[in-house]
Amino acid sequence: MTTSQEELLPATRRALLHRIAVAQAEGRAPSLVAAVVRDGRAVWHGARTSVDGHGPDENVQYRIGSITKTFTAVLVLRLRDEGVLDLADPLEKYLPGTDAGEATVAELLAHTSGLAAEAPAPWWERTPGALRPELADVLGDRPFLHPAGRRHHYSNPGYTLLGALVEKLRGAPWEEVLRCEVLEPLGLDRTSAQPRAPHAGGWAVHPWADVVLAEPVEDLGRMAPAGQLWSTTADLARFAVFLARGDERVLSARTVQEMRSPAAPAEAADVADGATYGLGLQIQYRNGRLLVGHSGSLPGFLGCLTLSVADDVAAVVLANCTSGPLLGSVAADLVRIVAEAEPRIPEPWRPLTEVDASVLELAGQWYWGTHAFGLRVTADGLLSLEPLSGKGRRSRFRANADGTWTGLEGYYAGELLKAVRRPDGAVSHLDLGSFVFTRQPYDEGAALPGGMDPEGWRGIG
């Protein structure tokens, strides 16, 4: 992939380079590579290394650890979109015989199944996958630690089960299905289950001395769908574009939006941290910006992919060390630097090409009791309902063929909005999930539940 350095201002490029230089130096990483994506393509690549005369570029592979889970989630969502499975169904329906069959597909995707975080000893990241040839070896004698659906508890065995599910329903190995259905369509030809030259070596950096130790590289076997992949900043930059926009050859924009939506109950600490989990994607609210993506780590390697859909900016950061630089913070900072230094230029406003008079009639001010709302007809053909105070329930609504509208987000997601008309055809009020919205506060001319006090509005002396 050819990246255009000229797309960003010189000051922005220097700020990006400075951020990764600090991360590599202070984090004591043997090497660190990064890329930034804007407007659907990579616009910057940077690298810092401890080896004189050698700078890894965007085509050097690093192991990406749990970023692999997002790829596995994409395969599962493809099966759902094809009608092969339902996310609400238990795993047992499609993959019988495991000791975790009661967990639903959705719970496995969102890490809410209650399964343990890790496979039984020995430490699976530093031992051959051949030691765990069967799913029973990955799950152990006590697969569940928590009630299903009650809490978010990150589970590597859970994604091992999802990989096995893909293999069962596709009738082919996980790696082969991934290559045919995701990697090749998206042009990710430098992403693979096994390392391909040029690739970085993995290192452990001594916590109290500036010396390094080579880390073993193990094939994870059954657990590959949870963390096996190797990739590059170039490939992950393309993958970030897909996660923001979708690609009809793999998943629609609507489905990747579903992946980016919270799907796990947040604990108190998660609420405080502004973090939750979607379907194969981590979600966090950091410094006023909603970020989605995934981090990854295996002995010798760290990685992070994060994107801000609102800013249309994504960042990828990879390093070849077991611990050190906090790549989640680095990636978030790269997104912030570009988004703040060179804010996204919005598309020109354009009016609707046509509008139904009966829809335009709904625009304007409405009252839910005494709460004032504004209803707008927007250029994308939706209705937008917002409190005039700026605080409170808000939603957009999509038109239905029968003249009703369906809420798209927030409190009113999935709820029906309909205009109730009088015999003469004039609008009496809006019915939103049984709530009555009137043109005046408690309009006595509308069919108002509970009626109006006969004394009407009055002062109190």
Image: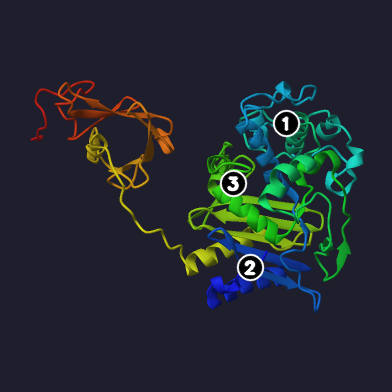
- Considering only vertical position in the picture, is 441 above or below 37? above
Residue 3, numbered circle: 2
- The answer to which image quadrant residue 450 occupies is top left
Crowd band around label 2 with a 10 angstrom C-alpha radius: few (<14), some (14–19), many (20+): some
Task: Describe residue 121's horizontal placement relative to residue 393 as left or right.
Answer: right
Q: Could you tell me the amino acid type at mark 3?
A: Asp
Say if mark 3 contacts mark 1, CB within 8 Å. Answer: no
Kind of element beneath mark 2 = loop
Q: Quadrant of the C terminus?
A: top left
Q: Could you tell me the amino acid type at mark 1?
A: Leu
Say if mark 2 contacts mark 3, CB within 8 Å. Answer: no
Q: Which residue is mark 3?
A: 247
Kind of element beneath mark 3 = loop
Q: CA distance from mark 2 to mark 3?
A: 21 Å
Q: CA distance from mark 1 to mark 2?
A: 46 Å
Residue 310 seen by the camera: yes
Q: CA distance from mark 3 to mark 1?
A: 37 Å
- The answer to which image quadrant residue 304 occupies is bottom right
Q: Position of residue 118 (x, y in %)?
A: 78, 40
Nearest to the observer: residue 236 or residue 325: 236
